[in-house]
């Protein structure tokens, strides 16, 4: 990882949770690795009336609780905290931006003296249009010379449907060029997600098989054992489809399905993933009815403790129709993937926390050995574990020692934890550093966000307007509605259920 040139990071929404739990602790981790610029400052901006000292005290708590380097000596934490400043304004009010500009310039003069600023929007989404506009009106969106620059990082959710995402892109682009805009999807910052590109494009053995001729289907699961963690207000307006599938899971699908890029630069890569999103077969009414299952967790007992159902969570309506689980089958209509189904699912309050991509290869054309099962239950699988226990697992058939030719499926595994000497940066560490170095490869381009919304919009609309589309209940702590198995219409094939059979210890299990 490269040390960036001198600059400032200006965080809007600095009194919020993300700043304390993620941004500052992860910036501190970069500091400990000597990866922050030599001359650098972080400026927190929010309406709450803090002094620099109060802001630093609160961020110190954040570092001590959430940073991976939390056990660093106090002098080191204090040295980092001296780089933190705070400016209180009402960010919705354009009249307050002249003051903001003067204050940022003053801090820049005494710290980085660079004129290079990253503006990080960690605010409620309602401000994603307003703050860039105010930055534009006050002239903060441009440095006014060619030597220094301005960049803008925007948290998810980027819009809540296609129309709002288009409007947001349109309004931000009045003041910032696409090259200045960094839309975050923190899944892309995960080490194992990036490893997907390396697995595919640095190995001669996988790529020739990576197509409809050898792959039966692709499965992507992102299960969480937690519930909505007190975020009822946000989640009610979002649901699993918007919260996880429209962004994180489709991004993973994009990396699995993309063509090899011409070069390893941001535009070459993003030019390939957008083609995948544009090739997603539009979902018909019938697909929405038959190929998508939504569910909501019900009160149940997990490890002997009663957990509330979704409708009993704080901030959730007692007759809520918001989904906490979604499973979907879809197709990528292009030359490589013609006819290969993609299955993706995500849910809250599932038995374990696991995100994995499973590439299911086709069966051998002829069954030579007696006990090879029919269907595809013994087919080769490549499991790419995004989290936890990050790694890769290849399942293949081996002869059982002894008489006859009995076949048993065995695992060939690689665990990132085996590379104990390698430090695994967190997603935010990686993404923050990339933006500081002007590398947008792992950020989402505006056209990609819109293409993903275009794909899911009909589902949002159908679920909203058609009450006859079922919402299935599932007990908290289970793998979601059993009906989700019906998405597979091939005998003997269903989801991979990590941990369902606890003898199958190839994944970390919380149960
Ligand atoms: C966020 C969602 O984007 O991703 C959360 O809003 C979800 O609901 C989280 O819990 C999952 O991310 P991770 O990195 O914990 O798997």
Image (cartoon, grey):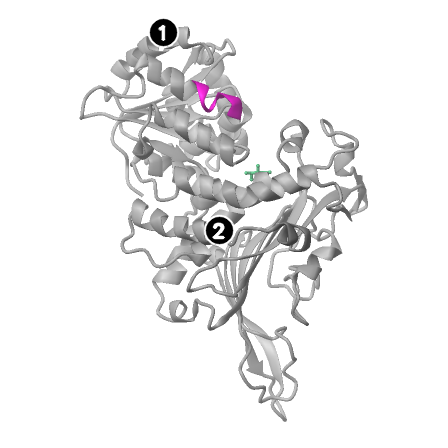
Real-space Cα separation, disc 1 to disc 2, in angstroms:
42 Å
Whole-percent x and y of residue 3? 28, 37
Q: Report the residue at 54% width, 35% height from top.
A: 161
Whole-percent x and y of residue 394? 51, 68
Residue situated in front as seen by the camera: 94 or 277? 277
Q: Is residue 444 visible?
A: no
Left or right: where does residue 202 sit relative to residue 325? left
Residue 127 lies within the magenta run: yes
Residue behind mark 2? 252
Whole-percent x and y of residue 261? 32, 55
Compared to 500, does 118 lie above or below? above
Residue situated in front as seen by the camera: 368 or 24? 368
Residue situated in front as seen by the camera: 287 or 326? 287
- Tell me where the magenta segment starts and ends, as one range: 125-130
Residue behind mark 1? 99
Compared to 266, does 159 lie above or below? above
């Amino acid at each position: 990882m490269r040390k960036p040139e001198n600059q400032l990071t200006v965080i809007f929404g600095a009194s919020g949770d993300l700043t304390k739990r993620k941004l500052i602790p992860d910036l501190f981790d970069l500091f400990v690795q000597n990866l922050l610029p030599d001359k650098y400052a972080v400026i927190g901006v929010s309406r709450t009336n803090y002094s620099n000292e109060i802001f630093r005290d609160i961020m110190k708590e954040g570092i001590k609780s959430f940073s991976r380097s939390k056990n660093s000596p106090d002098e080191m934490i204090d040295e980092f905290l001296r780089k933190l400043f705070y400016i209180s304004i009402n960010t919705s009010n354009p009249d307050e931006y002249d003051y903001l500009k003067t204050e940022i310039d003053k801090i820049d003069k005494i710290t980085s003296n660079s004129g290079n600023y990253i503006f990080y929007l960690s605010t409620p989404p309602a401000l994603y249009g307003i703050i860039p506009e105010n930055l534009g009106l006050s002239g903060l969106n441009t440095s006014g010379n060619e030597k220094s620059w301005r960049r803008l990082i925007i948290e998810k959710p980027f819009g809540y449907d296609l129309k709002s995402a288009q409007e947001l892109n349109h309004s931000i682009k009045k003041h910032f060029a696409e090259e200045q805009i960094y839309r975050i999807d923190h899944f892309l910052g995960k080490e194992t997600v990036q490893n997907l590109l390396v697995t595919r494009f640095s190995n001669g053995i996988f790529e020739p098989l990576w197509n409809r001729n050898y792959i039966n289907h692709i499965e992507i699961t992102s299960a969480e054992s937690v519930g909505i963690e007190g975020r009822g207000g946000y989640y009610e307006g979002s649901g699993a489809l918007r919260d996880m599938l429209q962004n994180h899971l489709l991004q993973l699908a994009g990396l699995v399905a993309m063509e090899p890029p011409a070069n390893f630069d941001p535009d070459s890569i993003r030019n390939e993933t957008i083609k995948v999103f544009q090739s997603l077969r539009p979902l018909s009414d019938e697909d929405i009815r038959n190929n998508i299952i939504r569910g909501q967790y019900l009160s149940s007992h997990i490890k002997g403790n009663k957990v509330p159902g979704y409708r009993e969570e704080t901030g959730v309506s007692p007759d809520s129709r918001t989904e906490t689980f979604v499973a979907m089958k879809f197709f990528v209509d292009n030359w490589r993937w013609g006819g290969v189904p993609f299955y993706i699912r995500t849910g809250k309050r599932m038995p374990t926390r696991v995100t994995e991509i499973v590439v299911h290869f086709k069966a051998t054309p002829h069954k030579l050995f007696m006990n090879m099962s029919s269907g595809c239950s013994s087919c080769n699988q490549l499991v790419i574990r995004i989290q936890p226990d990050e790694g890769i697992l290849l399942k293949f058939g081996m002869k059982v020692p002894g008489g006859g030719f009995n076949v048993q499926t065995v695992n060939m595994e690689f665990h990132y934890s085996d590379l104990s000497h390698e430090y695994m940066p967190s997603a935010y560490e990686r993404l923050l550093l990339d933006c500081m170095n002007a590398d947008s490869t792992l950020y989402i381009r505006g056209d990609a966000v819109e293409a993903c919304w275009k794909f899911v919009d009909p589902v949002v609309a159908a679920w909203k307007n058609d009450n006859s589309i079922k919402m299935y209940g599932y007990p908290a702590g289970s793998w979601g509605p059993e009906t989700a198995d019906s998405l597979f219409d091939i005998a003997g094939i269903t989801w991979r259920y990590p941990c369902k059979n606890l003898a199958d210890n190839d994944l970390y299990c919380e149960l």
